Amino acid sequence: MITIDQILSLEQTAKQVGSGIDPQALTGIWRLQQTWTRTGQRPSPGTDPLLRSLGAQLSLEAVNDRLRIGNQVAVGPLRLCFQGDAELKGTRPLLMFSFDSVAVMINNQTLLQRSITTPSPQRMPFFALIGMGQNREWLAARGRGGGLAIWHRST
């Protein structure tokens, strides 16, 4: 498992020369494993186990020349799913995204679906991609709010 010190070191390198992460490397389902605060401290006790128990995940799929992004949590068969578009910008790079819909589903049946208004460019959410495991088994990023996260690729 990668440590916070290793992530912070990778982040400095990514700021200077980029992380080398490309869209093809990102495709797949990523399960949230661990988070840290803006300053690299552990979050409140129980935060990570709660997010893991809710199956917090990020999915990225290449569609033509764009990326589709999904984010979801689940309690049993009940899922809250956000979907939208994403793109990589810059050499670091930033994974800029916006969700265009949210759905509540049970198993694969949609119970409720709503459109979401796209935020202004200044408020667009993003992940600054810090690094990826040599075999693409983990992904580290810093979110717009400053928190750090590490995801493991789902097999």
Image (cartoon, rainbow, N blue to C red):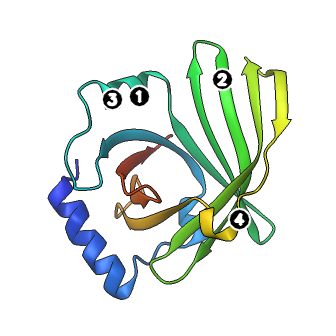
The residue beneath circle 3 is 47
Q: Quadrant of residue 85?
A: bottom right
Percent coordinates x, y for residue 151 in the rendering: 41, 47
User: Residue at point 54% right, 82% down?
Assistant: 90
- Observer-nearest residue: 2 or 71? 71
Per the model, the C-alpha gap separating discs 2 and 3 is 19 Å
Compared across the picture, whether 128 is left or right of 83 comes to: left
Answer whether labels 1 and 4 touch (C-beta < 8 Å).
Answer: no
Which residue is depicted at the point 38% across and 23% down?
50
- Where is residue 5, by image quadrant? bottom left
As rendered, which of 103 and 39 lies closer to the eye? 39
Mark 1 or 4, nearer chain start? 1
Image: 115 above or below 16: above
For mark 3, give the secondary structure. helix
Q: What residue type is labelled 1?
A: Arg
* Closer to the camera in the image, 143 or 76: 143
Tag 1 residue: 52
User: Circle 4 is placed at which residue position?
Assistant: 120
Foreground: disc 2 or disc 3: 3
- Neighbor class of circle 3 (other Cα within 10 Å; few <14, some 14-19, many 20+) is some
Disc 4 element: loop
- Between discs 2 and 3, the one toward the N terminus: 3
Depth check, mark 1 against mark 4: the one in front is 4
- The x, y position of residue 20, in whole percent, is 44, 78
Q: Residues within 10 Å of mark 1 (few under 14, many from 20)?
A: some
How far is the residue under mark 2 from the one under mark 1? 14 Å
Q: What number is the disc on residue 79?
A: 2
**Amino acid marked by disc 2:** Arg
Instruction: Give whichever of discs 4 and 2 has the lower sequence position.
Output: 2
